[in-house]
Image (cartoon, rainbow, N blue to C red):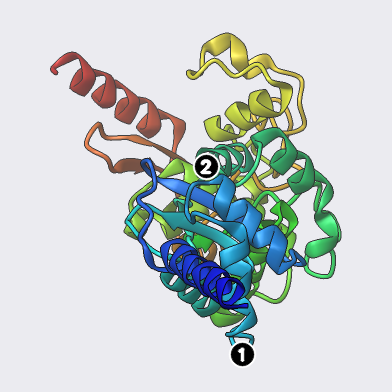
Amino acid sequence: MRKILIFLLLVLIAADAWLAWALFLPVSPSGQKFVLLRSGYSTRRIATELKNAGVIRNASAFVIWHYFHRGRSLKAGEYLFEKPGNVAQVHRRLSHGDIYVHTVVIPEGFTIFDVAQAIQDAGLGPSNEFLSLAKSGVHLIRDLDPQARSLEGYLFPDTYQFTRAQSLQDILAAMVKRFRQEASTIGLHQDVHRIVTMASIVEKETAVPEERSMVASVYYNRLAKRIALDADPSVIYAELLDGTYQGALHHDDLRINSPYNTYRYAGLPPGPIANPGRSSLQAAMNPANSDYYYFVSNGNGHHRFARSLEEHNRNVAAFRRTLQGR
């Protein structure tokens, strides 16, 4: 009987030693370890994922620790482990929801193609899948723009923080929600399709905020006179849709047969050609009062505006001389 008690005592001591080893001895991950824990995972599944990633020593020890800390629910999400930690510390992070977020910066003027690449570069999903959803997700803005062909124009430029636990649909919805918030703030409630389409052209034509209302006035003046807009960014977008854009625009490209080609087809294109920011939306809503019909770069980031073709040609010649003098 004594030997049995001694044996049981030794077993108990060994079990305690093993548990202490498994629970409290820190594990050092080999480099950065990302672990994605999806909603619905059981405690055993979570423990297994952590063990396979080399974050904890033993899955059973993690389950035991959680059993005695049931008051702490474990949060789904992606976690980054790069520093030594033990089971107690790992469990605490999961119960606090110390989730790793991917920062995605969407500048003003990004197209859905640019946004899709940014999402892929952030490790949040393949660009082709994002593009497919952006083209088919018009139900998200149908009440605002019944004519929308895609979500182009409605993925508001901003700095976002997403997790890999979010779906691509969630990401698109978050960007559209930001557009709705901005539209409400600036009072964009009517003629949304036309305003956003114009704002997208303005956004692509100038990066100078104070020029945007003037650029908008040029295009509205041309529309009123039924003069073709001749907007180069619309041709680039036509080629992006066609998959033929080579990174630069050439004279022959102006002949592309696309409703987005504003050299070939008068009026606004069928929809936005980029995702405009706040100032471009405001410029499209409140254009300057001008009698300009043309503009061209001055070679220094701004533009020269002209009332007649003759004046415009002189400005073009001045621009070319500026380029030659560099």
Dot 2: few (<14), some (14–19), or many (≥20) neighbours within 10 Å? many
Q: Is residue 283 above or below residue 27?
A: below
The answer to which quarter of the image holds residue 80 is: bottom left
Question: Which quadrant holds the N terminus?
Answer: bottom right
Q: Is residue 278 above or below residue 245?
A: below
Residue nearer the viewer, 218 or 280: 280
The answer to which quarter of the image holds residue 309 is: top left
Q: Position of residue 234 (x, y in %)?
A: 61, 34
- Label 2 sits on a secondary structure element that is helix
Give the CA distance from mark 2 to mark 1: 39 Å
- What residue is shown with label 2? 118
Q: Position of residue 200 (x, y in %)?
A: 57, 50
Asked whether the viewer can see residue 288, the reply is no
- What residue is shown with label 1? 71
- Label 1 sits on a secondary structure element that is loop
The answer to which quarter of the image holds residue 24 is: bottom left
Q: Position of residue 162 (x, y in %)?
A: 55, 60
Residue nearer the viewer, 183 or 250: 183
Residue nearer the viewer, 60 or 27: 60
Q: Amino acid at mark 1?
A: Gly
Q: Amino acid at mark 2?
A: Ala
Q: Is residue 309 above or below residue 71?
A: above
Q: Quick one: which residue is furthest to the top in this view?
A: 252
Asked whether the viewer can see residue 255, the reply is yes
